[in-house]
Image: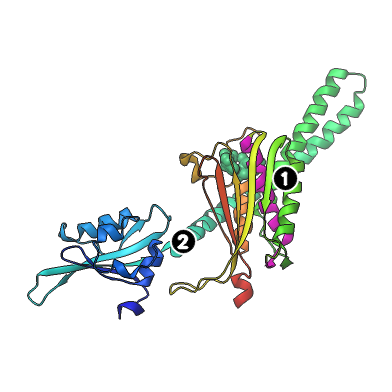
Amino acid sequence: MVWNLRNGVIAISRDGRVAVMNDIAYRVLGLKPRVKDIGRHFSDVLKDVPDVSRIVAGAFEISHLPNRAELRLKHTGKVIGYTLSHVKDSRGRDVGATLFFKDLTRVEQLEERERLRDRLAALGEMAAAIAHEVKNPLAGIEVMAGILKRQLPESPDAQNILADIIKEAKMANVIVQEVLAFVRPLRLQVEDIAVPDVIRDAVTMAESHSALKRDVNVRVDMPEALRPIQGDPHQLRQIFTNLLTNAFEAMNGSGTVEIAATAIDGEDDADHASGPTILITICDNGPGIPPEVMERIFSPFFTTKPQGSGLGLAIVRKIVDAHDGRIDVGERPGGGTIFRVTLPVRSQQQLFG
Ligand SMILES: Nc1ncnc2c1ncn2[C@@H]1O[C@H](COP(=O)(O)OP(=O)(O)OP(=O)(O)O)[C@@H](O)[C@H]1O
Ligand SMILES: [Mg+2]
């Protein structure tokens, strides 16, 4: 019965020896299954997952055992939902304990995505309304300043000021256009595309945008035989252009950016079937993202740069979502930032739609 369960199960006897540990338990905890674990002390078997070991250790110490509690595993970032219960003999004495758990990571991600979508919808409507209202007066200012400039050819002071006004109005207009582009719903033009081509284009684009790539070394590591994926080439290029531009800006002119792609076979575990995906990592050795900022970097208009609009990552997120992909960000071991983009070879909509 235990082997066929769709949850992770660990059972221990009263003296702390592991009596049962099923394959799902090993997989969710990121441990290698070993036959000889049975009979060993749980603190030994679970030494690489101290957070779980601590829960099991509480089995005979606390009277109210947790039912349906949640825990984020530190080493993998996975979220598990778990229930700890006692095993009693016929006379009601505790003879052991069991831990049942389930990987909730996917559920959590979906919920988070849902929340973000709601927030963006409200924010987007407002931004679109404002941008729309501002667009016309802005165009008016630019045109009228142009007229005035032509009428005052003799006054160098006026010429300078009017040139500045026109320049500023143009800049404001770029922001308005960006906002409108961001809030407009995405329509993907899906085709078969080669990820390495998209990435190479993005490198070229990011390099041409960025004044800051003087001593930046860009390393691309990609198997040429990577299978094509279904996606919108322009939108996907935008993802990597934005991520690379951020990396260049973070490193302030010198450092190394590494982009790598790998194919990942779909895993069909009990909880969710996911088809084959491609994982693309973008890694820089800049200063990294401070933890207190990490949560907000994907929010529209969040920026730490004097000239930034804060839309780069919000757009990235939107495009990744539209492709049914995932993106997460972490600290690069040794300093810097690593962005991981996972794109399905075929998206859900194409499978079921
Ligand atoms: N590779 C990175 N290293 C360090 N910080 C980063 C990195 N990528 C993003 N950030 C942080 O996340 C913030 C948001 O990034 P985002 O691309 O959304 O906006 P931006 O770059 O500030 O402005 P824009 O892209 O619109 O010009 C940045 O201001 C920066 O603080
Ligand atoms: Mg940016």
Q: Quadrant of the N terminus?
A: bottom left
Write down the region rendered in magenta.
227-251
Nearest to the observer: residue 234 or residue 218: 218
Residue 301 visible in the shown view: no
Residue depth check, mark 1 versus mark 2: number of the one nearer the observer: 1
* Residue, disc 1: 206
Answer with the quarter of the image where residue 87 lies. Answer: bottom left
**Considering depth in this image, is 160 or 82 the residue closer to the camera?**
82
Query: Seen in the image, is 279 located left or right of residue 105?
Result: right
Q: Main secondary structure of the magenta part?
A: helix
Rendered residue at 9%/72% (across/down): 92
Q: Is residue 72 magenta?
A: no
Check mark 1 vs ligand 2: CB closer than 8 Å? yes or no: no
Q: Distance between the residues labelled 1 and 2?
A: 32 Å
Residue 213 picture location, percent across and down: 71, 37
Mark toward the start of the polypeptide (1 vs 2) = 2
Quadrant including the C terminus: bottom right
Q: Kindly indicate the quadrant of the structure image that contains residue 319.
A: bottom right
